[in-house]
Amino acid sequence: MKAHGTNLPVDPKRISDTIKGLARITEPDRPYTRRAFTPLFLEGRAFLEQQFKSAGLETRIDAAGNLIGRRKGRRSGLGTIMLGSHSDTVPEGGRFDGIAGVATALEVAQALSDGDVRLDHDLEIVDFLAEEVSIFGVSCIGSRGMAGLIPDGWLSRTQGDLTLRQGIVEAGGDPSRLAGQKRSDIRAFLELHIEQGPVLETETCDIGVVNAIAGITRIEILVEGQADHAGTTPMGARRDALVAASRLVVAIEKLAIEYSRGEGHFTATVGEFSIEPNAANVVPSRARLLIDARAELRPDMDRFIREVSELAEWTAQATGIGVTPPKIISDNQPTPGDPLVLRLLDTACEATGASHRRMASGAGHDTAWMARITRSAMIFVACREGRSHTPDEWAETDDIALGAAVLLHAVIQLDAELQKPIQETV
Ligand SMILES: [Zn+2]
């Protein structure tokens, strides 16, 4: 098996054909747009299903509306190794975000088939439903569904006349089978994705082996001043909520810069900001800010939350303006990559001659949900100027193909390693 694995070639042209084929299925006036829960998305799905079938895979749609292609292993009782990503896009998105992961997963299956290599485990290729924030205001529907983690109440979310429940049915899923159901046969999950940041390109590095997907915490702060006439209230007699909030924004940035120089990936952004009454001749009475903070290491986030609370208190004291204690709106833990899978990915990079580095993902991915039910890890390939979620998004076919070769190598090694008594090494 080992000898096969290292020598099996991947075919860059096939990968690029899949990517181009999907790129043609877009809203014509708004490339590249293939939103989940639209007829175009289903058209993309039909194209992919055809590709899966041509690669000799048995296809099906699972309860959560994920498209799955399966290649049976020699010893099916061992369980499944799964690879994949998503084919939906944001509005005016790119050709590679998610799609590169589906195309390379498919290429791994094709290369195994070409080489007549049958794994012991079953191999499944997946196109997850609706990874991007969908019309229902939520993301990663397919991967959450596969992990049995779609929260109660989500299925009745509506957009116009459509419920999420109906949307999943239209994608071929069966929401009635979702509640509490999770796949228990998956032994490992791997996802290739474009980096969506500039690090790999800047360092001329082929592959990012993703140590962890950052946890995301959203924190709301309200600042309560007093509305007064902007022309008659003396400068020294105001309680201007915006001025106090601005101090906070600048202090939060300073704090985040400090954290970002530490060991783990860290960002914090005041991405939402509003004031009342928002009128030219009125001293602002109220400001609301929403912080999006992302940390690879949870202790950093815990400390950041504490320090933001202190900042809020300090701002209130320094300005005499009311600042509410920061309120945590949502809080997701970081997702560390599985040590065994990470180790095999490093080895696969070395075996395929790919330069590689460990890095964190600041963006969320389906892998974060799959990691709740199985050993999981991701790899990144470079994208031009780090740009993503734009029609300008670009990744070189050769870079993606090298990523496919790394996945292929890792899958073959995993097939063997998962059958050994596992020794955890970090
Ligand atoms: Zn993506």
Image: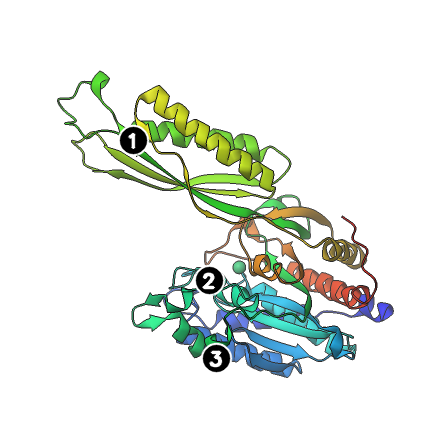
Percent x, y of residue 35: 42, 67
Q: Is residue 350 above or below residue 129?
A: above
Q: Which residue, as the protein is rendered here, is positioned at the far top?
A: 236
Q: Dot 1 lies on which element? A: helix
What is the quadrant of residue 244 in the picture? Answer: top left
Q: Dot 2 lies on which element? A: loop
Which of discs 3 and 2 lies nearer the camera? The answer is 2
Q: Is residue 143 above or below residue 294?
A: below
Q: For residue 77, say whether it is visible.
A: yes
Q: Which mark is residue 151?
A: 2
Q: Quadrant location of the N terminus?
A: bottom right
Q: Dot 3 lies on which element? A: loop
Q: Check disc 3 and give the amino acid type.
A: Gly
- Considering depth in this image, is 163 or 101 the residue closer to the camera? 163
What is the quadrant of residue 17 in the picture? Answer: bottom right
- The answer as to whether callout 1 falls within 8 Å of ligand 1 is no
Mark 1 neighbour density, 10 Å: few (under 14) some (14–19) many (20 or more)? many
Percent x, y of residue 242: 29, 31
First along the sequence among labels 3 and 2 = 2
Q: Check disc 1 and give the amino acid type.
A: Leu
Q: For residue 28, say whether it is visible.
A: no
Percent x, y of residue 250: 41, 29
Which of discs 1 and 2 lies nearer the camera? The answer is 2
- Considering depth in this image, is 153 or 270 the residue closer to the camera? 153
User: Which residue is label 3 attached to?
Assistant: 172
Left or right? Give the position of 332 relative to 231: right
User: Which residue is label 1 attached to?
Assistant: 242
How far is the residue under mark 3 from the one under mark 1?
49 Å
